[in-house]
């Protein structure tokens, strides 16, 4: 799984970009997704809503869950989205993450977005 952090030092938030910069960035993401579909490596990928739309859920499994709007840690960094890919090895996942990191930002300059590469764990087989 390739996790995209939102905050990039020196790059304004995407909601402050010029419309043509946003279109170029989104087109890059769509093109990369299409390449991964064509290669058979794409599993899923989504952008995530802003943190202020998130909910925290806590449950003891008996009582109704407690759902709150926070508190969230004060941070400029948050998870912006992800790509789930099915690749042969870590090197290929890193290569895809590097491409995604270089997505164009304002004026078409690569934003160098930090990408976290993490393996998706498989559940152990159930006991018989």
Image: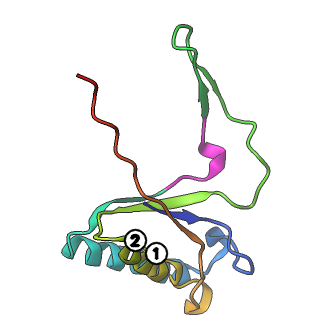
Mark 1 nearby-residue class (10 Å; few <14, some 14–19, many ≥20): many
For label 1, the SS is: helix
Point out the tag, 2 or 1, that comes first from the N-terminus.
Answer: 2
Q: Residue at x 46, y 75 (%)?
A: 97
Residue 97 - label: 1
Horizontal side, residue 71 vs residue 25: left or right: right
What main secondary structure does the magenta stretch of the protein show? loop
Q: Residue at x 57, y 19 (%)?
A: 59
Q: Residue at x 77, y 56 (%)?
A: 75
Residue 50 painted magenta = yes
Of residue 17 and residue 1, the one placed in the foreground of this image is: 1
Residue 86 painted magenta = no
How far across and how far down the image is residue 118, in percent? 47, 60
The magenta segment is 48-55
Horizontal side, residue 75 vs residue 44: left or right: right
* Quarter assignment of residue 69: top right
Residue 8, compared with residue 75, is above or below; it is below
Q: From this viewpoint, which residue is outermost toward the right?
A: 74
Q: Nearer the viewer, mark 2 or mark 1?
A: 2
For label 2, the SS is: helix
Residue 90 - label: 2
Q: From this viewpoint, which residue is outermost toward the front?
A: 128
Horizontal side, residue 28 vs residue 75: left or right: left
Of residue 24 and residue 46, the one placed in the foreground of this image is: 46
Which quarter of the figure is the C terminus placed in?
top left
Q: Residue at x 56, y 8 (%)?
A: 63
Residue 97, compared with residue 71, is above or below; it is below
Horizontal side, residue 90 vs residue 40: left or right: right
Which quarter of the figure is the N terminus placed in?
bottom left
């Amino acid at each position: 799984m390739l996790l995209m952090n939102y905050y990039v030092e020196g790059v304004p938030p995407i909601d402050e970009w010029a419309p043509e910069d946003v279109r170029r960035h989104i087109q890059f993401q769509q093109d990369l997704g299409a390449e991964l579909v064509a290669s058979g490596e794409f599993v899923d990928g989504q952008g995530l809503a802003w943190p202020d739309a998130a909910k925290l859920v806590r449950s003891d499994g008996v009582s109704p869950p407690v759902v709150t709007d926070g508190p969230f840690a004060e941070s400029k960094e948050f998870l912006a989205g992800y790509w789930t890919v099915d690749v042969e090895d870590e090197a290929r996942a890193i290569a895809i993450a590097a491409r995604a990191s270089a997505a164009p930002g304002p004026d078409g300059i690569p934003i160098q977005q930090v990408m976290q590469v993490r393996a998706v764990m498989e559940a152990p087989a159930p006991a018989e």
